[in-house]
Amino acid sequence: MKEITSILFSLLFLASLPSTAQEQRWQLKPMVGMTLSSLVGDTAAPSENTPMAGWGCGAEAEYRLSDRWNLSLGALFTKRRAKSDVTVGYYDGQTFNITESRYSTVFNQIDIPLMAHLQLTKGLTAGIGLQPTLLLSARQNILKDGDFYVDADNAAYLSESVVMSYKNRKFLEKGTSTDIKGRCRMLGMDVPVGVAYSFDRVELGLRYSFGLFNAIHGCNVQSRCLMLSLGYRFGI
């Protein structure tokens, strides 16, 4: 969070400088923001997926096509976090038992948004595009002590074969962390849509990205991410 605070102060300082870039055809926009992410779709066990906060930063280059249309290409780092509360029933030979457990899934990735932007009114734009993604790392963190169905590497509830086999049930303590990058999609594709408001060189943006493919192999869940960002424009 210290890094985000430093970037925010830098952007606010730059906003006080005289404006010379508004009429440039090419502009560069460094940006930083907060993310709210979740996983949606059919899961391998009865569960409730809820969003968690993360952060993102990067830059976009924008080309002014006309008075109302712009094109942009960017490279952003985003930390996406999602929480899952899972309920699974099992029969131990004598009684039917219910287990309730909680974990978070954390994705660190590079997003490359290519977007078209339409100016709606002075300072207000709306955009849509395509966003290839590259997964850098992925971890699963246990948020609550409990019984989990896991594979040999202690990864829980990542595929139907793990849960439906009812074989590898294990008690995991809060704080247990497992690297799950090998079980996740390395290259993905999002559709980003959003709005932004610019004042002088400063831009406040709100963007929602939804994944087109499963984020985890063997599990029908897709990533969703809402990002609130603050950017600053330079003429280039």
Image (spheres, grey):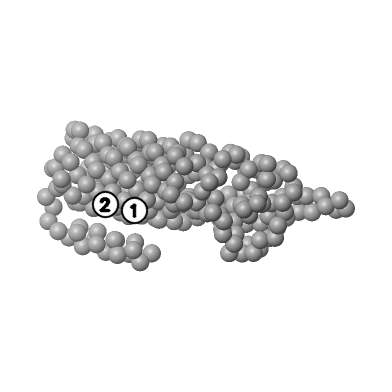
Q: Regarding mark 1 in the picture, which secondary structure is present there?
A: strand
Frontmost residue, 163 versus 88: 163
- Vertical comparison of 233 with 26: above or below: below
Q: Relative to 69, is 18 above or below?
A: below
Residue at left offset 58%, top offset 64% = 175
1 and 2 marks in contact (CB < 8 Å): yes
Residue nearest the observer in this picture, 122 or 44: 44
> Considering depth in this image, is 195 or 106 the residue closer to the camera?
106
Apparent side of residue 53 relative to residue 163 in the rendered image (left or right): left
Q: CA distance from mark 1 to mark 2?
A: 8 Å
Q: Amino acid at mark 1?
A: Cys
Amino acid at dot 2: Pro
Q: Which residue is mark 1?
A: 57
In the rendering, at what x and y percent does residue 111 appear?
38, 44
Secondary structure state at the residue bearing disc 2:
strand
Residue farthest along the bottom direction in this orientation: 2
Q: Quadrant of the C terminus?
A: top left
Instruction: Return the residue found at the far front.
Output: 152
> Quick one: label 1, few (<14), some, or many (20+) residues within 10 Å?
many
Nearest to the observer: residue 41 or residue 201: 41
The residue to which callout 2 is attached is: 30
Name the residue located 56 percent from the left edge and 59 percent from the top edge: 177
> What residue is drawn where x is 24% and y is 62%?
10
Mark 2 surroundings: few (<14), some (14-19) or many (≥20) residues within 10 A: some
Side (left or right) of 78 relative to 106:
left
